[in-house]
Every structure is written in structure tokens, then in C-alpha cells.
Amino acid sequence: MVAAGAQPGPRRRGRRPGGSDTRGQLLEAARVEFAERGYEGATVRRIADRAGVDAAMVNHWFGGKEALFTASLDIPIDPVELLADILPGDPEKIGERVVERFLTVWDATGGGPLAAMIQSIASHDAAARMMREFIGNVLVGRIVAAVSPDQHELRAGLCGAQVFGMGMVRYVLKFEPLASADHATLVAAVAPSIQRYLTGPLP
């Protein structure tokens, strides 16, 4: 405890002592910073300062700002891993890879985190803005930047609507027969639209 009138000492550098919830403090601080400043405006330094830890702790626990942003949204997706699975390969088959990979990720969790995310963004403007930035800057926007010839923002929005709309119908509304359809059926039905949004001509 700091005595009355005394000035607190300098912030301890490096990892906090055992027992302190450094990861939780960083997540809490990140949610505030990202909500206030957006993905581009928030910095690792400001997040660490708000959490009262050294900035190196962001890399220690999350590997960087992007992964911290994803964790702060409580999305069971590693964007780096997901993009590494989707981007390599035939560009004309990327729609199939997008649909298959998202279904695999969501099926592994039963869609619970997706349902919680949709409820959050429906009732909180800050959460909705963070999700828009996640789609535009961290995930779908990077797929579009890698393969699309033009109109990147429009293409990212169309792909995001298709992919997350599919997730909502399958896992939140549980609308049949989509809720119980196998991956091959959904890939065959949805992937051509994703492919056109990514690489085909748009009006």
C-alpha cells in the first residue's frame, strides 16, 4: 500500500508478479481503447499503459495488436492462421476455402461465440464498430486486398455479409436445412457467391 501523500513508484517493467491477471487486464484495457479510438487509432503502448504493464506483455500474451484485438472481441478465430489456410492456392478456388474454413471454425465451437458476438454488436455501438473494423482491417479486408482487382471496400462488405449471414442463419437462428447441412452442400451453394464477390466483375 502506498502511504498517504507518497508518489507511486515507476511501473514495473516486464511480466507482472505471479497471481496477477495480466492477460485479463490487457483485454479489459484493449476493449476500452479499441472502442474509443478504433483499431487504427489504438496503440499497444496506450493499451499497456491503461493496463499498468509493460508493452512487451502484449506480445508475451497475444503476439501483437492484431491478436489482442481479436481476443478482445472474444472471437474463436486466429486471423493469421485463418489467412494462412485461405490465401495460398488457386485464386479461383478461394471462395470454397473461405466457406469451408469458416464452417470448420464455427462448428468446433457449436456457434456459441458467434451467437454471443451477434447479441453484443446488436446492442452496443462500440462492439458493432469493433466488429466492422475486424472484418474490414483484420480479416475479410486482407483477403480482398490479396486477390480482388478493384472496389475493395464493396467486395469486403459483400463477403462479410455473406459469410457472417451464413453463420447467423446456421448457428443463431438454426434455420433448417442450413443448420444441419454438411459442409460440402454449403460450400457448393455459397462459395460461388463469395468467389464472385472476391474476383468476379461487379456492377
Image (tube, rainbow, N blue to C red):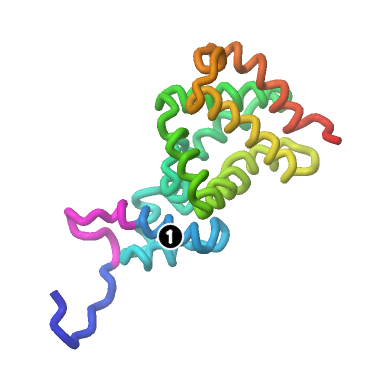
Q: Is residue 5 above or below residue 152?
A: below
Amino acid found under the numbered disc labelled 1: Val
Q: Is residue 202 above or below residue 67?
A: above
Q: What residue is rendered at 43% in x and 55% in y?
A: 31
Magenta stretch encompasses residue 23: yes
Q: Is residue 142 above or below residue 21?
A: above
Q: Position of residue 34 (x, y in %)?
A: 49, 58
Residue 59 as seen in the image, left or right of residue 8: right
Q: Main secondary structure of the magenta part?
A: loop
Q: Which quarter of the rendered picture does the C terminus lie within?
A: top right
In terms of image quadrants, where is residue 155? top right
> The residue tagged with tag 1: helix, strand or loop?
helix
Question: Magenta residues?
Answer: 13-25
How many tags in the picture? 1
Q: Which residue is mark 1?
A: 32
Q: Position of residue 171 (x, y in %)?
A: 48, 25
